[in-house]
């Protein structure tokens, strides 16, 4: 019965789609004849609106990409730098990503380059890694193929090609947000306002300024395209060709997003929860929602196979939720009748889905071996106050700014640009309207097939309900972790711009206020044009001069000490040498010199996390013998000590690297509310500079400047004082 019911539903869907395609022109012709307009005139008008809207969207994306490129050039003086100085601008994990891109280009063939990355034993000492799987290097694989296949070797340098692709993707990101707001509001004025708010709040909408090669900068543009396509796909009365196009775009962008970022399935899980709630209250076509679930399922399976059988995808909450929803689909189909029993069963259905999803995820984690993101669960426990720890890695993560609660400055910046007040206004109106619709559905009232402007029921549009739920869920995450603001704020820009430019939203508000003095439809149309125009002019007056100042102001980024260190390593260090030091510096050394290192700034591997903690002991109060044993266990030949870490004066006491090491090593004594560091050894990074025994027995200083001290780790130890 369930299979026949599903077939009947698909058949009705096809028939409705065909009928709407046939009826739409007839209805439009009747309406046009009433207004005295010919169908040809309306066709030209619609084409012009579509053409200029698309032109504005593409132009906005291109201008934003050019803006990023110009700002990057002004900030780093990239064109006037030598290759070494350019590479130093890539810091931490960014340096590692770009170094693998360089290795791919240097390989004799693409196949050989991929093999060397999947069996990499030239990056981390005593460790062979599959870098493609562990670091999600598909962006670098694609960039290297495009660079070589397009014949760009003689036209553009590899670094310009690489960052150019990233800036181009950011342009696509902005274009997708433009289109999403346009589709929801019906006017591309909303898209223009979305782009303006996005750029003005760039500090809180993107991390492109700080880390160009980061995975999210490659992945989020595809997610924005998926959201834009999903917005169109959820719309009512969509013609067949547009629906198929949106469906295919959702397919392609979901799969690509899954391959670009290791944490993509968590963001898709949030989206799946939004769709689940949307469908649970019968606010969208069930068949459409379940088509999206199938896309998730397909993407997870294909991603698992192409990501070298990545077990993290099999134990992901996304897969568990989707499978639970698919198993409960037949039950949901039988609950669409407006009876008390069906409403009771609907509550049971929600409970059933959640129970099955949690149980399935628990069973998968029991039977499928996985180590992925265990530290993430431990971090959540400590963050929520469910546990305490002295572990260095956990406390170091808790001290990171991106993992703190958002600061007041964040909300102040959004308020100064007028984004936050309008977002709250739009969200409240939409939320109340959605609540009204849900109560009407609970009472058994059917949804209208076509919501007209004069109805004032913006909460009956499924794409609007989806975005309301989605931004609320992302907002809850952003209120807990500041790093999540980069996922939330772009959609805040989009939703706020849609709302102020939508006559339906203003009409919904006027329906509640029961306006009689002024015709509500006329006033809604006027406000939907006047309010965004006023906002646009005020933003132009206040923020445009600042943006132009950013592009014209000459900034200087130069790190002579790091340049000197890299130059010394390339000239003086043996080719087979292994360097030890802070993970962030090791990433830069690997990129700029190609030498092997003992650790990397990666946080998704337990062994590397343990390595990082052990090598950070060079800034602790441990003996020279202990440090020597740690370094030689990783076959390190040279030790690099950074003065900035050794003499760090952090803004928050207790979050400096040396403070965290003292806590982890038990070198902190608390008396009367004050904490004191205590150990029978001095701090290693200070003591080694004194050049006395036993430090000179184990280590020999071979290079130093104002920021770095390099020591050769002795293979033959002399114990003469």
Image (cartoon, rainbow, N blue to C red):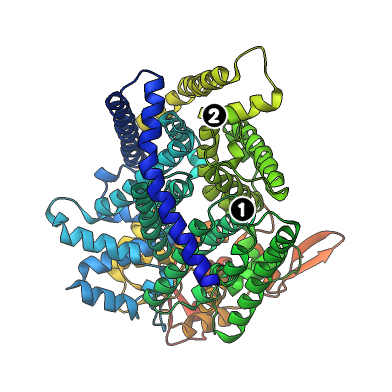
386 above or below 285?
A: below
Is residue 193 rendered to the left or right of residue 156? right
- Lateral position of residue 502 relative to residue 430, left or right: left
Which sits earlier in the primary sequence, circle 2 or circle 1?
1
Callout 2: SS: helix
Q: Is residue 55 above or below residue 688?
A: above
Residue density around tag 2, few if under 14, some if 14–19, many if 20 or more, within 10 Å: some
Residue 658 percent coordinates (x, y): 62, 64
Compute the Cα span from label 2 to label 1: 22 Å
Q: Residue at x 39, y 77 (%)?
A: 305
Q: Position of residue 686 (x, y in %)?
A: 57, 65
**Which circle marks residue 282 in the picture?**
1
Residue 219 placed where, x, y %?
A: 41, 56
In which image quadrant can residue 393 be found?
bottom right
- Residue lying furthest top: 517
Q: Residue at x 43, y 60 (%)?
A: 11
| Residue 292 visible in this rendered orientation of the protein | no
Estimate the x, y position of residue 513 in percent, counting from the top left: 70, 23
Question: Which of the numbered marks, if any, corresponds to residue 453?
Answer: 2
């Amino acid at each position: 019965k369930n299979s026949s019911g599903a077939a009947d539903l698909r058949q009705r869907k096809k028939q409705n789609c065909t009928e709407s395609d046939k009826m739409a022109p007839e209805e439009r012709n009747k309406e046009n004849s009433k207004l005295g307009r010919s169908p040809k005139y309306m066709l030209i008008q619609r084409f012009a609106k579509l053409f200029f809207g698309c032109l504005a969207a593409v132009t906005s994306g291109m201008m934003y990409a050019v803006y990023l490129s110009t700002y990057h050039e002004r900030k780093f003086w990239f064109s006037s730098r030598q290759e070494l100085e350019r590479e130093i601008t890539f810091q931490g994990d960014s340096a590692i990503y770009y170094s693998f891109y360089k290795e791919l280009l240097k390989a004799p063939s693409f196949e050989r380059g991929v093999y060397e990355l999947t069996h990499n034993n030239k990056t981390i000492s005593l460790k062979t890694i599959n870098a493609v799987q562990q670091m999600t290097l598909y962006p670098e694989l694609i960039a290297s193929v495009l660079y070589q296949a397009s014949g760009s070797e003689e036209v553009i340098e590899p670094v310009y090609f690489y960052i150019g692709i990233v800036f181009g993707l950011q342009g696509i990101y902005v274009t997708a947000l433009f289109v999403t707001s346009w589709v929801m509001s019906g006017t591309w004025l909303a898209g223009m306002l979305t782009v303006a708010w996005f750029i003005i709040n760039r500090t809180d909408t993107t991390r492109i300024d700080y880390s160009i090669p980061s995975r999210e900068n490659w992945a989020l543009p595809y997610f924005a395209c998926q959201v834009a396509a999903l917005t169109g796909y959820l719309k009512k009365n969509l013609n067949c060709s547009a629906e198929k196009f949106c469906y295919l775009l959702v397919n392609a962008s979901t799969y690509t997003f899954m391959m670009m970022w290791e944490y993509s399935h968590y963001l898709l899980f949030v989206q799946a929860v939004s769709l689940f709630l949307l469908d649970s209250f019968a606010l969208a076509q069930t068949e459409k929602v379940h088509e999206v679930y199938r896309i998730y399922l397909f993407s997870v399976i294909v991603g698992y196979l192409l990501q070298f059988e990545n077990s993290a995808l099999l134990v992901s909450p996304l897969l568990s939720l989707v499978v639970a929803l698919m198993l409960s689909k037949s039950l949901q189909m039988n609950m669409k009748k407006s009876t008390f029993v069906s409403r009771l069963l609907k509550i049971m259905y929600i409970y059933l889905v959640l129970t099955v999803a949690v149980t399935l995820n628990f069973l998968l984690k029991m039977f499928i071996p996985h180590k992925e993101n265990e530290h993430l669960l431990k971090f959540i426990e400590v963050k929520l106050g469910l546990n305490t720890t002295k572990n260095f890695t956990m406390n170091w993560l808790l001290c990171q700014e991106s993992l703190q609660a958002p600061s007041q400055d964040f909300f102040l910046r959004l308020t100064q640009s007028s984004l936050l007040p309008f977002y709250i206004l739009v969200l409240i109106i939409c939320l109340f309207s959605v609540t009204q619709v849900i109560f009407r559905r609970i009472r058994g009232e059917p949804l209208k097939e076509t919501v007209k402007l004069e109805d004032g029921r913006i909460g009956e549009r499924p794409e609007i309900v989806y975005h309301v739920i989605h931004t609320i869920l992302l907002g809850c995450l952003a209120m807990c972790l500041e790093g999540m603001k980069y996922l939330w704020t772009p959609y805040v820009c989009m939703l706020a711009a849609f709302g102020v430019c939508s006559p339906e939203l203003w009409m919904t508000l006027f329906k509640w206020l029961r306006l009689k003095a002024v015709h509500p439809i006329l006033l809604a149309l006027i406000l939907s044009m006047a309010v965004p125009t006023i906002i646009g002019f005020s933003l132009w007056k206040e923020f445009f001069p600042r943006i132009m100042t950013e592009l014209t102001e000459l900034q200087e980024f130069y790190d002579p000490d790091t340049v000197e260190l890299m130059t010394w390593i390339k000239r003086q260090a043996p080719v087979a040498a292994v360097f030890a030091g802070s993970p962030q510096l090791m990433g830069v050394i690997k990129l700029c010199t190609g030498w092997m290192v003992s650790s990397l700034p990666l946080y998704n591997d337990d062994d590397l996390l343990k390595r990082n903690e052990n090598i950070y002991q060079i800034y602790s109060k441990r003996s020279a013998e202990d440090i020597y044993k740690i370094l030689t266990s990783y076959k390190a030949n040279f030790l690099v000590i950074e003065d900035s870490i050794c003499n760090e004066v952090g803004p928050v006491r207790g979050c400096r690297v040396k403070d965290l090491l003292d806590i982890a090593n038990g070198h902190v004594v608390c008396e009367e509310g004050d904490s004191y560091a205590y150990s029978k050894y001095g701090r290693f990074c200070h003591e080694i500079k004194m050049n006395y025994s036993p430090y000179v027995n184990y280590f020999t200083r071979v290079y130093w400047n104002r920021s770095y001290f390099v020591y050769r780790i002795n293979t033959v130890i002399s114990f003469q004082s």
